[in-house]
Image (tube, rainbow, N blue to C red):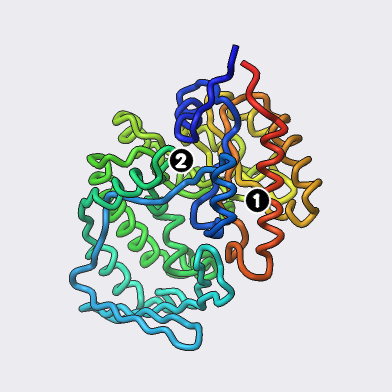
Amino acid sequence: MRQTIMNNRERIEAILGGGIPDRIPFLPFSELIPRGSYEREMRARGMGFIVHGASLWSEMPSVEVSQRTRDGEATATYRTPVGEVMTKYRTHAQGASNNASVQQEWLIKGVEDYHAVIFMIDDTTYHVDQSAYRKAVADLGDDGIVHTWTDEPPYMDAQYFLGLEKWSYDQYDHPNEFRALLEALARRQERRLQMLLECPDSFINLGNLAGNFGPSQYKEYILPYYHRYVPWFRDRGKRLTIHADALNLSRYLDLVPLTEVKIIEAFTPPPVGDLALRDARGAWGEDVTIWINFPETVFYGGYDATRRYVIELLQSDPCPNKFLGMTEMGLMGVNESNEAIFKEGIRAIMDGLDELGPYRK
């Protein structure tokens, strides 16, 4: 009997629907892949994309924002009726595929900055505009899926205003201000998610498991967030993801199922992460979709080692409820210094998938 050939959208629909695709798909985040003839070659061989888009956009109508870039440093200043705050980024000048930048200063530098930041959060207003989302879906066609980000649970989200070090101290040194920040972030997220429920976005990320705070805090602050919002979206038929890129994911092995989210993305196996695919499957069961972030360090072992790794990794988990992707690809993405290594590595992934061939049904 002839094997039915699927496109990437059909493969994902088969996987998420509890079925079996014709073969394991490879769908990296689109912003991580260099454009041009190489991209076209890989797409012709079956590589698809995860594209990020959303039906919501936001503004802060009572906040004046000014931006300046000089000598590779971008500065954004926010002026509110209760104070002014500023953040800085160092832009990347080596042709990164995702045009990334590195944050150098965060909005909250002192306790006095909390007032302005909380004002900004409460001033954030969301609007529905489905045109950009629908365009992303139409442009992508059958090559993959459009994935909607929704920021983070408040406890995690606060890190992006304080930086990890200050976030670690302020919750103990300034508990009242820190609590007020979390409450403001919770109010903002509720507004956002309520509006998103009515939008066509169907593949939605609800948060990040980065592993930079312990399981006890995850239980206290993060699980209640999922227990509140997962039923909202599940009852509307939305598919939810957690970006679980923690390199110490084994510490959270038993907590992941408690979120009731059924798609775990950015799962990074050894030699980068500490949780093997086989062990994750054993703990989470066959109804969880494991969206694997291919560990980029494997590329530096060369083509043969990369192709062999692909085959051994995917054969370690016979369950078809998984697919291969790239969600991190280095701090800066592909740039001039490592482009050849990454191109060879991605080609080895495609060759390894060809060698695995179709699923045996």
Residue 251, how many percent across, how many down?
64, 43
Kindly state the secondary structure of the residue where label 1 is placed: loop
Image height check: is 181 above or below 189?
A: below
Is 126 placed left or right of 291 in the picture? left
Residue 268, how many percent across, how many down?
64, 46
Residue drawn at 45 percent across, 74 percent down: 106
**Front residue (pair 307, 270):** 307
Crowdedness near tag 1: few (<14), some (14–19) or many (≥20) residues, C-alpha within 10 Å: many
Q: Are marks 2 and 1 in contact (CB under 8 Å)?
A: no
Residue drawn at 56 percent across, 71 percent down: 95
Give the mark nearer the N terminus: 2 vs 1.
2
Q: Quadrant of residue 336?
A: bottom right
Quadrant including the C terminus: top right
Kindly state the secondary structure of the residue where label 2 is placed: strand
Q: Amino acid at mark 2?
A: Gly
Q: Amino acid at mark 1?
A: Leu
Image height check: is 151 above or below 354?
A: below
Q: Which mark is residue 247?
A: 1
Residue with the mark numbered 2:
144
